[in-house]
Amino acid sequence: MDQPSYLLTLLEEARRAAKNAHAPYSNFSVGAAILLRDDRIVTGCNVENASFGLTICAERTAATRAIVQGDRDWKAIAIVSPTGVTPCGACRQFLSEFAPNLEVWFGYVDERKLVSGPISLAEMLPGAMKFQR
Ligand code: THU
């Protein structure tokens, strides 16, 4: 897939969000930007805590913001970090609740580095858990 027209803006918004990361423990600021089907963008950053296990990843803060706003129709997510990381297992499960086929792009906070993607969330988390009674 060629890079779509929205990708640069999505990465730019993710980088802007990464600047607000609260990451004093890891010193690893991450930003995420979700593109809604109506072209609006919802961003998130990682929020760490002195009790390390309470840390929330950028993907989940973006996802949660979108849900609070009532925006559940997601097309793509861009994630930027110092090393171009992919979402952790918890975030894959969390995102797949709302958008199992989400288009995922990875980039860097340093915009000179190359972006990779897209990969669909279903490919990143085969057999995602669904609640069944
Ligand atoms: N982190 C994210 O926010 N998203 C990812 O995809 C990977 C990891 C955060 C969690 C923690 O604050 C820091 O990056 C180091 O793992």
Image: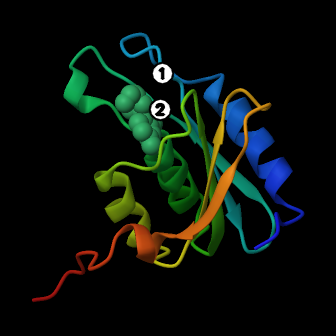
Type of amino acid at the residue the image marks with label 1: Phe
Q: Quadrant of the C terminus?
A: bottom left
Type of amino acid at the residue the image marks with label 2: Asn
> 35 or 89, which is in the foreground?
89
Label 1, residues with CA under 10 Å away: few <14, some 14-19, many ≥20: some
Q: Earlier in the sequence, mark 1 or mark 2?
A: 1
Residue, far bottom? 133
Q: Is residue 102 left or right of residue 6?
A: left
How many numbered tags mark residues here?
2
Q: Position of residue 48 (x, y in %)?
A: 37, 23
Q: Is mark 2 within 8 Å of ligand 1?
A: yes
> 93 or 20, which is in the foreground?
93
Q: Is residue 90 left or right of residue 13?
A: left
Q: Determine the CA span between mark 1 and mark 2.
A: 9 Å
Instruction: Name the element at disc 2.
Output: loop
Q: What residue would you read off at disc 1?
A: 28
At horizontal 32% and vertical 77% (from top left) the residue drawn is 126
Q: Position of residue 132 (x, y in %)?
A: 15, 87
Q: Is residue 92 left or right of residue 52?
A: right
Q: What residue would you read off at disc 2?
A: 46
Residue, far left? 133
Q: Is mark 1 within 8 Å of ligand 1?
A: yes
Tell which tag, 1 or 2, sits nearer the viewer: 1
